[in-house]
Amino acid sequence: MITSITASVFIGALLWMDREYALQIQISRPVVISAILGLILGNIQLALIIGVSLEIIGLYAPPVGGYLPYDENFCTVVALPVAYVASQTMENLPAAGFALVLCLPSLIIGREMGSYIMKTNEDIPDRLGDGWLNKIDSVMIKSLAGVYLRVLVTTCVCVTVFSTLALFIIPVLPEKAIKVFSYMPVVSVMIGLAGLVSGKRMHSRYSWVGAFILGISAAILWKWAS
């Protein structure tokens, strides 16, 4: 299990770079990342549940102008290994829902990480001086290697922290709570579709997180009342 998770972290960090820094051929989309990492982890069903959920959430909030949306791509890279850990003790659907809820902060972490990397890369020409164009190839290689290293370290930290939390939380979860988590992927899809239908982009972090918490609360109340 550790080998598969480690491989998924290394490959996931590399795939994430397609979002801004590498090929930009859409292999960083959640549904693509989930399919690839699902094969590595050996659980394609679990991976696609998370991938589709986060893909639909991200459809209505593309980057426009100076607006940086929440990073559902990074969340996919982090949530999949965590869901894989959870799937060792529960079924795929609640494991995916549990990972989506637990890894919700990675949506913000990924966005802030991307913003920080872009800002630190802006002054590369100034640091290199006037002759930087003559060594553009080596500059690009070093820059991409630096970006990958930062993404890899951030991914490792997030996966380690959230996986550790999962190992402590799962044993004390009541049966009803586990059943509630099985509805979380559907809640995610409903939030994404609602954003598309309304035509409103939730640019505010408070409105986005509030909508997600509201969906989770509705699922919990509905399940507890049934």
Image (cartoon, rainbow, N blue to C red):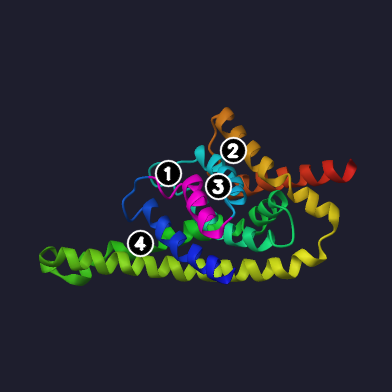
CB-based contact (under 8 Å), mark 2 and mark 1: no
* 36 in the magenta segment: yes
User: Circle 2 is placed at which residue position?
Assistant: 192
Q: Residues within 10 Å of mark 2 (few under 14, many from 20)?
A: many
**Toward the viewer: 131 or 169?**
169
Distance of label 1 from label 4 (alpha carbons):
16 Å
Q: Give the amino acid at mark 1.
A: Pro
Which of the two discs, 3 and 4, sits closer to the camera? 3
- Magenta segment, which residues? 26-42
Residue 215 lies in the magenta stretch: no
Instruction: Give amino acid for label 4.
Output: Lys
Q: Main secondary structure of the magenta part?
A: helix
Q: CA distance from mark 4 to mark 2?
A: 29 Å
Label 1, on which residue? 63
The three-letter amino acid code for the residue at tag 3 is Gly
Q: Nearer the viewer, mark 3 or mark 1?
A: 3
Q: Secondary structure at mark 2?
A: helix
Which label is found at residue 119? 4
Q: Is residue 11 left or right of residue 130?
A: right
Are discs 3 and 4 less than 8 Å apart at CB? no
Q: Which mark is residue 51?
A: 3
Identify the residue at horizontal 61%, vertical 70% (top origin).
161
Q: Find numbered disc 4 in the image and state the secondary structure of the residue it sits on.
A: helix
* Percent x, y of residue 171: 79, 66
Identify which amino acid the numbered label 2 is placed on: Gly
Mark 2 against mark 3, which lies toward the viewer?
Answer: 3
- Crowd rating for badge 3 (residues with CA inside 10 Å; few <14, some 14–19, many 20+): many
- Among numbered discs 2 and 3, the one appearing first in the sequence: 3
- Label 2 – label 3 distance at C-alpha: 13 Å
Mark 1, secondary structure of its residue: loop
